[in-house]
Amino acid sequence: MSYVKFSEIPVEGLENVYILPSARLSNNGKITTINLPDFLDAQSIFAVLKYVNNTWSIKGNSEVDDGVLVFGEMSRDGNNIAISVGKDADINSGVFRYDSVEDQWVQIGSDISDNLFPSLSSDGLTLSCLGNVDLSCSVFRYSDSSWNIIGQFNQDSFLQKQLSNDGNRIIIFVENGDDSGIIKVYEYDGENWNQLGSDLSTNINYAQFYIASSQMACISGDGTTVALTGVDDECYVSIYKYVGDEWQQIGDNIMLGVIEKESLSLSLSNNGNKIVIGLPDFTDEASSQGRIEIHDYSGGDWNLINAFNGDPIGFNYFGSSVSISGDGKVVSVVNGIAGEGFGNFKASFYRLQNSNKKKKKKRYFFNNMTGCKKLCTI
């Protein structure tokens, strides 16, 4: 099996995207978000697109551009979006559900004030955000037509987080100082959030997670697998599965060579058996063209399926943000890197092809009754 590029979306017009641009995929890979937040000019591009008849088109009234600072996320079912909108020094988050009859996004519940960087469960009914001031993490659940808080982690060292599909597990990064950090995973039992297993250590610090915009560690959709980056003599990715009551590493570390660890980005499939790794600072012949690697877990280890390098002409830093669909069949990759002066971006999309699939053969059969040939496909 291998992945083949089937589409791309160029995006232009923003020059100061300090948080990495992103293209997040739905479970089936047929819906994606495009999000480019521009801090310096307080504007953004955010849109939800659907892939129909070999073309990406806007889904509903989701397109947002000028005048606001937007951070957006989409639920894995592709029918809910959470948007943090900043204007006049205020940042509020809201959740919108797609109305297929009216072809528009309709807000459910009221805004949640002073929260940003939203993350949604697959059904869009659980929302996690970071506080705009202290960066503490809060989790909300939608019931009785309103968003009700079901958990809060009151430490300003919490920064990166991601929910599982059912919204009952969350991965959180805790700053540990000295260029290091701790990954914790919590599970909601209906009343309280309880830590699952022991801490997972990483030598990635607070600032590096902030730059990576929630992609230096990730959790699978089913909440059983986590991946995190680290560095020794070279960069690597470690993947752990929750077995019994502890996190156990599966397979060896995926070694990535000597690359700036701040720039790695990760995304796991729903079952945790496929991972896409973005390496935007990968260089080849002195060009920062970037690279992605797609790995599959089988036979007790991680095996490289494909590796793609970016185009060093025009669109550098390929792999700044990556996403893999829940079913593991589609991968999105964004070119461009956070910072002043980087105004051209491109999202590229790859689809899994099964090389073992038998090709259908066309054969003609002669009908003795009519004297005509009949075309059959077998």
Image (spheres, rainbow, N blue to C red):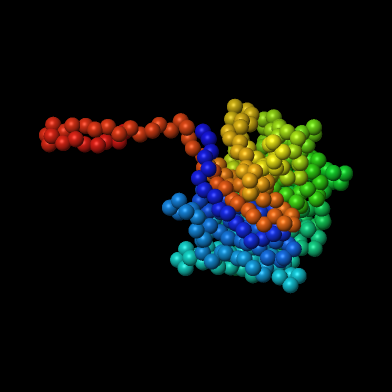
Q: Position of residue 151 (x, y in %)?
A: 72, 57
Q: Position of residue 255 (x, y in %)?
A: 71, 32
Q: Is residue 111 visible?
A: no
Q: Residue at x 53, y 43 (%)?
A: 5
Q: Position of residue 303 (x, y in %)?
A: 61, 30
Q: Residue at x 35, y 34 (%)?
A: 360
Farthest right residue?
178
Q: Nearer the viewer, residue 224 or 220?
A: 220
Residue 2 lies, with reference to residue 73, above or below; the image says above
Horizontal placement of 360 versus 36: left or right?
Answer: left
Q: Is residue 60 visible?
A: yes
Q: Nearer the viewer, residue 31 or 343?
A: 343
Identify the image quadrant of residue 44: bottom right
Horizontal placement of 169 versus 376: left or right?
Answer: right
Q: Residue at x 81, y 40 (%)?
A: 203
Q: Position of residue 83 (x, y in %)?
A: 64, 63
- Quadrant where the C terminus sits is top left
Q: Residue at x 53, y 38 (%)?
A: 3
Farthest bottom residue?
88
Q: Nearer the viewer, residue 8 or 47?
A: 8
Residue 111 lies, with reference to residue 303, above or below; the image says below
Farthest top residue?
299
Count the numbered circles shown: 0
